[in-house]
Structure formats: structure tokens, C-alpha cells
Image: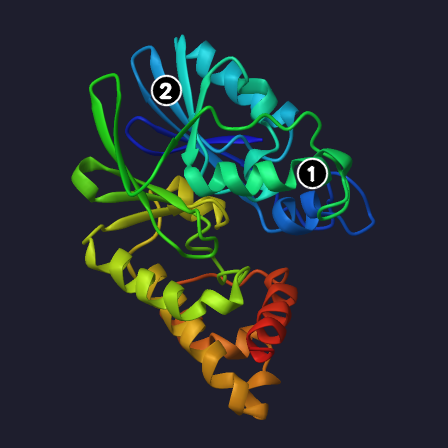
């Protein structure tokens, strides 16, 4: 796992996007196919002896490494904030069971309802997350937090998952985006809500942030400080094209590289072949509406 420093007081704990390497199994599984192959980062906001950990990563071992790194930097007081309920973002919760774990109220609802299947490894297949440690504190709407002298805002948005929580730093100039944004493309996990996701992307764009740090993105761009607002624009355009492709057989047959060619050529996003499978899933999910 690589430790990146995209901004002052912000660490990114990155793993995955390694050609030919799988972490859990050669067989289909959520850990490799939903996280490691696409590349994934958890983040920490650090100020003095305090830290807020944003997602607990793919495994308890990853989460323990995060704790060790933070402690080596003098952190003694940690909180956790979950970006949403999906497994690749909560799998390491056990390593932070003695810390306050914060999430949107719907994150707790989703995890509680699915807890037996998650712990049994039957929700999305192996590996199981057992025990699944649930959030201790929930919020709705917005939440103001302090990490040392650093003030931040946690804001609920309904993009990718209805319970998404993003973090605004530096007076709103920097956004820790969770899975509301991805590079190469968004994963449409709630196709019935795609129109709402589009309006929420517009709302996110209106905040005026200049830097975005997604959990699934290119490690070099994350290390360099994050993505420009054009990542939001690329996500909007891609989602709009998905809707249009329902009535356009030719568009539905395009490869992902062809489908997002304008944004790739403009440098707004980067091409990762593993997202071809995500694109096919998105087309099928939206086409079934």
C-alpha cells in the first residue's frame, strides 16, 4: 500500500491497479473486482495528534497499516468517517472498533440490513467481512467536524449510492469525493436513481471546488493533488450518454475508450481497461430501465 500526500494535512492510502495482480483470488470476488483491480484509496485528514480516517479500505490488514502509519506520525486521537456502505470502503472497520465511526444514517441502515450476508460472505460473494463493525454515530444533511485546528464539512449527496458522504476542506476548495466520482467512469450502482444522480452532480459542480480526490482514481493524479472540476463534467457527460444510449444501438456497442473519447483526448480522465467491464454493466443496468 502506497502512502501519498495530495494536500497539506491529507494522506491517501492507495492500493491496486497493478497489472496482472489480484489480491484475494483468481475467482470473481468483490475485493479484487470491485476495489483492487480498479485501484482504491482511503484518506486521512491529519492535524497534530488528531486524524479523521475517510474509509477503512479493503481489508482489516490495510486498516491496521493505516493506523500504524498515523501513529508513527504522532496521531493519538482518531475518528472514522465512512463515505458509503459498499464493502470495499468498510471492510477494515474492525481495526478502528475502539474509535468513533461516523456515517450517514442510511449507511447504518444499509449495513444493518445486510450484516448477516456480509459477515457470511454471501452478499457479493467472498471474502466475508466478519465481524462487520457498524457505525457508532450518524448524521443527515451536513455535519461540521474539527480535526485539530482543521475545520471541515461533511455533506450528504446521492450519487453512486444514496448514502454518500463527501468531505469539503480548505473552505470548500478540496473535496474528498468517495465514489461519487471515479476515473475512468462512475459505477452506476443505483440505476433507478440516475436522474437524481445527475442533478446531484450538478449540485456538486456548483460548490466551486477546484480539486477532487476520488477513492477510485489514478494514483499519480491523486499524488499530484487531485482532479480538476472537469472530472465532474466528465462524469456528467458519461452519465448523460448512458441514458441516450438506451435508444441508440450503435452507441451501446462502442467500447468504453470510444464512448468517452472526447474526455480522454481532453485529459479530463485516464483510461483503465478494467473499467470496460464496468461500462458494460452500466449499459445493461441503464438499458433495463
The quadrant where residue 266 appears: bottom left
Task: Indicate which disc residue 148 carries.
Answer: none
Identify whether 245 is placed above or below 268: below
What is the CA distance from the residue labelled 2 to the residue labelled 1?
A: 28 Å
Residue at the (18%, 54%) spot, across then down: 208
User: Badge 1, how many Cα within 10 Å: few under 14, some, many 20+?
Assistant: many
Residue at the (20%, 43%) spot, across then down: 172
Marker count (numbered): 2
Q: Position of residue 23 (x, y in %)?
A: 73, 39
Identify whether 148 is placed above or below 169: above
The quadrant where residue 100 appears: top left
Task: Indicate which disc residue 51 carries.
Answer: 2
User: Is residue 162 in view?
Assistant: yes
* Element under disc 1: helix
Q: Which residue is mark 1?
A: 118
Question: Which-is-in-front pick, marks 2 and 1?
Answer: 1
Identify whether 210 is placed above or below 84: below
Q: Residue 200 vs residue 283: left or right?
A: left
* Element under disc 2: strand
User: Badge 2, how many Cα within 10 Å: few under 14, some, many 20+?
Assistant: many
Amino acid at each position: 500500500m502506497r502512502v501519498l500526500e495530495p494536500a497539506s494535512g491529507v494522506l491517501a492510502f492507495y492500493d491496486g491497479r497493478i497489472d496482472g495482480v489480484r489480491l484475494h483470488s483468481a475467482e470473481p470476488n468483490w475485493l479484487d473486482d470491485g476495489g483492487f483491480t480498479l485501484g482504491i484509496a482511503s484518506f486521512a485528514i491529519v492535524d497534530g495528534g488528531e486524524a479523521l480516517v475517510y474509509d477503512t479500505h479493503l481489508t482489516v490488514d490495510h486498516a491496521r497499516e493505516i493506523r500504524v502509519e498515523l501513529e508513527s506520525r504522532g496521531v493519538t486521537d482518531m475518528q472514522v468517517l465512512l463515505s458509503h456502505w459498499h464493502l470495499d470502503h468498510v471492510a477494515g472497520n474492525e481495526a478502528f472498533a475502539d474509535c468513533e465511526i461516523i456515517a450517514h444514517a442510511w449507511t447504518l441502515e444499509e449495513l444493518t440490513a445486510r450484516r448477516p450476508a456480509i459477515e457470511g460472505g454471501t452478499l457479493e460473494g467472498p471474502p466475508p467481512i466478519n465481524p462487520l463493525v457498524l457505525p457508532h454515530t450518524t448524521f443527515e444533511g451536513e455535519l461540521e467536524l474539527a480535526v485539530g485546528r482543521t475545520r471541515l464539512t461533511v455533506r450528504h449527496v446521492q450519487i453512486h449510492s444514496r448514502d454518500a458522504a463527501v468531505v469539503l476542506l480548505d473552505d470548500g476548495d478540496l473535496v474528498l469525493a468517495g465514489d461519487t466520482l471515479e476515473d475512468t467512469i462512475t459505477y452506476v450502482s443505483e440505476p433507478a436513481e440516475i436522474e437524481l444522480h445527475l442533478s446531484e452532480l450538478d449540485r456538486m459542480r456548483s460548490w466551486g471546488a477546484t480539486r477532487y480526490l476520488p477513492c477510485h482514481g489514478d494514483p499519480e493524479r491523486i499524488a499530484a493533488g487531485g482532479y480538476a472540476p472537469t472530472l465532474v463534467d466528465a462524469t456528467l457527460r458519461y452519465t448523460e450518454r448512458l441514458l441516450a444510449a438506451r435508444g441508440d444501438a450503435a452507441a451501446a456497442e462502442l467500447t468504453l475508450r470510444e464512448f468517452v473519447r472526447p474526455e480522454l483526448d481532453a485529459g479530463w480522465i485516464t483510461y483503465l481497461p478494467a473499467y470496460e467491464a464496468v461500462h458494460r454493466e452500466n449499459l445493461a443496468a441503464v438499458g433495463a430501465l
